[in-house]
Image (tube, grey):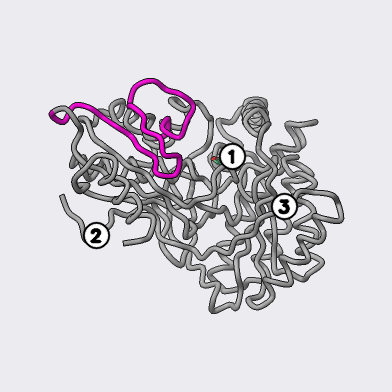
Amino acid sequence: MRETEQRAARAYTEKFGGEPDLIASAPGRVNLIGEHTDYNGGFVLPCAIDRRIAVAVGAGGRGGFETRLYSADFDQTRQIEDKDSSWADYPRGVAWAMGEAGHGIGGFRAAFAGDVPLGSGLSSSAAIEAATALALDAFFDLEAGRTDLAIICQRAENDYVGVGTGIMDQYASLLCEAGAALLIDCRSLEARSVPLDLATAGLALVVCDTRVERGLADTGYNDRRATCERAASMLGIDELRDATEGDLDLLSGAELKRARHVLSENARVLEAVEALENEDFDEFGRLMYASHASLCDDYEVSTPELDTFVEAAERHGATGARLTGAGFGGCAIALVEEGETATFTNACEQAFADRGFEEPAFYEFVPAAGAEVATGIGK
Ligand code: GLA
């Protein structure tokens, strides 16, 4: 068992007594390319990271009816009722969405432990949702498919927690495979793994957390979504996925800029997949830089910190770099030659210090497995 899974199991025993019946865990993600395309019916290419949230689950208290949620990281116990804008809203939302989807859920006790950085845009929320969904699916023998579980998690996020995200993060957390990225067609919801053998290519995936809280992110995010919907309706199409180059002539202002990003970004995702399949990381990196430029100029979701990181990467000769996730703060990624990462991150730190920005945090992730029920413990 992974360390987080062991921690969740221990927390369960300490809090509720006895052994849990099962343990599941799910990862955070970074998106390699394909930003703000998911809610436009387009393409995305995320990969899971080797940071997870684990949950240990057992029968409910008081004859099985009472549900209790415990977080080892916050040392907090919560009931299933009473939404309170805490971490517990994610498992609550999943339990609620499962009921809405017609799955019978009884009482359960769940203890959570994780190591996905929180609030940095690495999808800790999708990780806790996916871990909960997979654990409840196994515990209550629901036999829902992973695609259905991802949709349930998105419903939890959109309609219970109240954040209007697309499907990318939940899909990535549930369906990614180790050593691979996941190409998702966010309209058909078909997904396939694309090998991402960074080690053989001598590359490392460096993630920079700019430490800029995504305070305004939700307003900005919803605003971008609304503009895309407006642009689509001006063009008489359901989603910007269907927009053509010619359509752009019919738009102006913010609608034109947002639509141009979505159009070019969708094309870049498909080109990036081809590049990965040809093991052409130089081309892949070029597409990453182009994605960042489009997110900066047309989608206008970058920040001075994210731009500073990408500029430092370019100066340093990194294969590729871009902001990842929603933007407005959070994280950026770079593909850097292995053995160069220390000098690279030092150079970035210096660039941040020179501009008076807060010191960033750096992580190196490997493309990891999606959600799993841990073996070695059975119901
Ligand atoms: C956030 C959302 C995703 C996606 C990205 C932008 O991470 O949760 O659904 O829209 O922003 O690509």
Task: Check residue 242 in the rendering and tell me which mark sits there, or answer none.
Answer: 1
Q: Position of residue 257 (x, y in %)?
A: 75, 38
The N terminus - image quarter: bottom left
Look at the numbered discs 3 and 1 and tell me whether their residues touch, using CB distance below 8 Å: no
Question: Which numbered mark, 2 or 1, is in the foreground of this view?
Answer: 2
Residue type at mark 1? Asp
Q: Residue at x 69, y 75 (%)?
A: 340
Disc 3 marks which residue? 292
Residue type at mark 2? Thr
Residue 198 falls in which quadrant of the image? bottom right
| 287 shown above or below 148 | below
Using the rendered image of the protein, determine whether residue 270 is visible from the camera's viewpoint: yes
> Where ligand 1 lies, by image quadrant?
top right
Residue 81 part of the magenta-drawn span: yes
Q: Residue at x 45, y 35 (%)?
A: 87
Q: Nearer the viewer, residue 139 or 42?
A: 139
Say few, some or many: other residues with alpha carbon within 10 Å of mark 2 (under 14 / 14 to 19 / 20 or more): few
Say few, some or many: other residues with alpha carbon within 10 Å of mark 1 (under 14 / 14 to 19 / 20 or more): some
**What span is in magenta?**
63-90
| 225 shown above or below 355 | above
Q: Secondary structure at mark 2?
A: loop
Disc on the earlier residue, 3 or 2: 3
| 190 shown above or below 259 | below
Estimate the spatial distance between the alpha carbons at disc 3 and disc 2, rounded to whole Å: 40 Å
Say few, some or many: other residues with alpha carbon within 10 Å of mark 3 (under 14 / 14 to 19 / 20 or more): many
Q: Nearer the viewer, residue 129 or 243?
A: 129
Task: Check residue 375 in the rendering and tell me which mark sits there, or answer none.
Answer: 2
Question: Which numbered mark, 3 or 2, is in the foreground of this view?
Answer: 2
Q: Position of residue 207 (x, y in %)?
A: 63, 58
Look at the numbered discs 3 and 2 and tell me whether their residues touch, using CB distance below 8 Å: no
What residue occupies the far top of the structure in this picture? 82
